[in-house]
Amino acid sequence: MNYLYHLIAMFAISGLLAISLDLLVGHLGLLILCQSVFYAGGAYAFALSTTQWHLPFQLGLLIGIVVGGLLSVPVALALRRLRGDAVVLASLAFLLLFIEMIKNLRTFTGGLDGIQDIPPMGFGSLLIGSPAGFAWASLAFLVISWAFLQRLTGSSIGLFLHALRDYPQLSTALGQDLTGMHLKVFFLAAAIAGLAGCLYATYSTYISPDVFATSSSVMLLVMVLLGGPGSRFGPLAGAMALLILPESIRILGVGNEAIGAIHQVVIGLVLVLFSGLRPKGIFRGYEFR
Amino acid sequence: MIWLWLETLKNGLVQGSLLAIMALAFAWVYHSTRFFHLAIGVPFLGGAYAAIFLASSAVIPSALVSFAAACGAGLSLLIYGLVYQPVARRNASNSLRLVASLGVYFFCSGLAAIAFGLDIKYAPTVIYDSLELGRVIVTATDIKYVATATIVIVVCACVHPRSSLGSRVLALSGNSSLFEAFGHNPSPIILAAFTLSGALAGLCGAYEGLRNGIDPNSGLAIAISASVACIVGGRSLLWGPMLGALMLGIIQAATTQIFSDRWSDSVPYACLLLLILAGPRGLLGPAHPHERP
């Protein structure tokens, strides 16, 4: 039963990351590879505030979300000026640089050793230490975030985002505040990724740079592309598919090292097929050109 | 102090000479197709693994390096034929091609991890002979590195101006629509560029594999460094990427000297970010108004 709760918890964390990235990929039309920057930012900020400064869980969570969101400001301002492959490459450079910083700023981040003994989830005197408690709590976070984003993208803001995505020149000509909207959307997406980082840190009680490596960011992009960018359930379906895949391979008795490699092969294959066939994903989302 | 900086310069030149070959490999594809071929890490890995596994048998070094280059060229052509050509036929934008190249890289490095394991593979015998020039120690491998890079560059410099391939690649890079409008077929030129690029990447991989060993995830970092050197070098197929690579190698060595070895890996990423953000539309913006971003 604990294994099922573990899967639910991991689905909730992956789902949060996927829906946050989908806001940028599916609704803003930017192929971004640096979502792990915000994820890692939230996780490290939470871990530092709860282990080094001994702040309570709620405050750590708030700091993690805000730090995740704030990290998006320089990224959003930089990417705002770019288009096409420059966006993909710049976001990859941001990610690689950030991971190198995490590895090298050992005083704060613990370097390659990471940060250990991160306290479990708890709200005041209510400690959610059991796998079931964490699974349902994280699922609640996912449902609330998903419902909020659905409402947001279904409103006039969503229409504005789609106009920005489909007719960037027209939106500029109509005098819309593009930079402001970019900053807000990036902040929201990054804050949700920061929340996912906090949840991951408190769940695993240990974080290291390996968790947020390039492959993790590419995997998030695959979740969104596979499910269908900009669709209602696509990112969640993508997250579920990529969660089930390694678990089904594990059932066949394959070792952890081989599972990682097979996972990487599948991710590569999905990216190649996506670029070549340009499908709209499982839930028929936005089609990139 | 002066010896310390001479040692740094030597390290930068050695690192930069390896990168120069890789940057040349990257430049040929980049200028003929105008997209970021990050999957160049695959022929690099292919060349490295081929060299390491052949090094255990009694194969003469020149045959070993040639085989690694042939492996690289073969892999490069496979990538072009199986992935890039179908993607290009569907008129995909450069961002989708970049995503495809990342996909190819992840697919192939995953296959390499399944086949050879995640740990670093080393060549069975490495020669550590060295000579001392003052207080600067130069190993036999360092000399081989610089000598190979010099030979490759000299050959490219001799062949390039006399062949029409280089000028055709640059013409294709300048304006692909006009190139086709004048009745030229870009396919054989792109094919030749991929072959040459793969051979150079395989050669580079062989040297890196024999010197430092190789693991399945080491292709992306060198592909990014090569792309930085290529952008720094501008619209050139020879001297630009080469100078860019040497500059990057020296900056990395200086970073190691001033700060620490840990920060030297960050240099190419920081340079790439600065280069992309440098222009109003970034250095990667379309060169011509009709070109798709």
Image: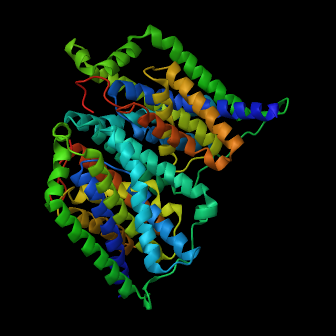
Q: Is residue B42 above or below residue A14?
A: above
Q: Quadrant of residue B154?
A: top right
Q: Is residue B211 left or right of residue B70?
A: right
Outermost residue to the top:
B162
Q: Is residue A175 left or right of residue B21?
A: left
Residue A203 visible (yes or no):
no
- Quarter of the image for the C terminus of chain B: give it: top left
**How was this image coloured?**
rainbow
Q: Quadrant of residue A58?
A: bottom left
- Quarter of the image for the N terminus of chain B: give it: top right
**B277 vs B232, nearest the viewer:** B277
Q: Is residue B179 left or right of residue A217?
A: left
Q: Residue A30: x and y, percent?
A: 28, 47
Q: Residue at x 25, y 45 (%)?
A: A178
Q: Residue A231: x and y, percent?
A: 17, 59
Q: Is residue A103 above or below residue B229?
A: below
Q: Quadrant of residue B162?
A: top left
Outermost residue to the bottom:
A125
Q: Residue at x 47, y 72 (%)?
A: A201
Q: Residue B217: x and y, percent?
A: 50, 50
**A257 vs A224, nearest the viewer:** A224
**B144 vs A68, nearest the viewer:** A68
How many numbered marks are there?
Answer: 0
Q: Residue at x 52, y 61 (%)?
A: A209
Q: Residue A81: x and y, percent?
A: 33, 39
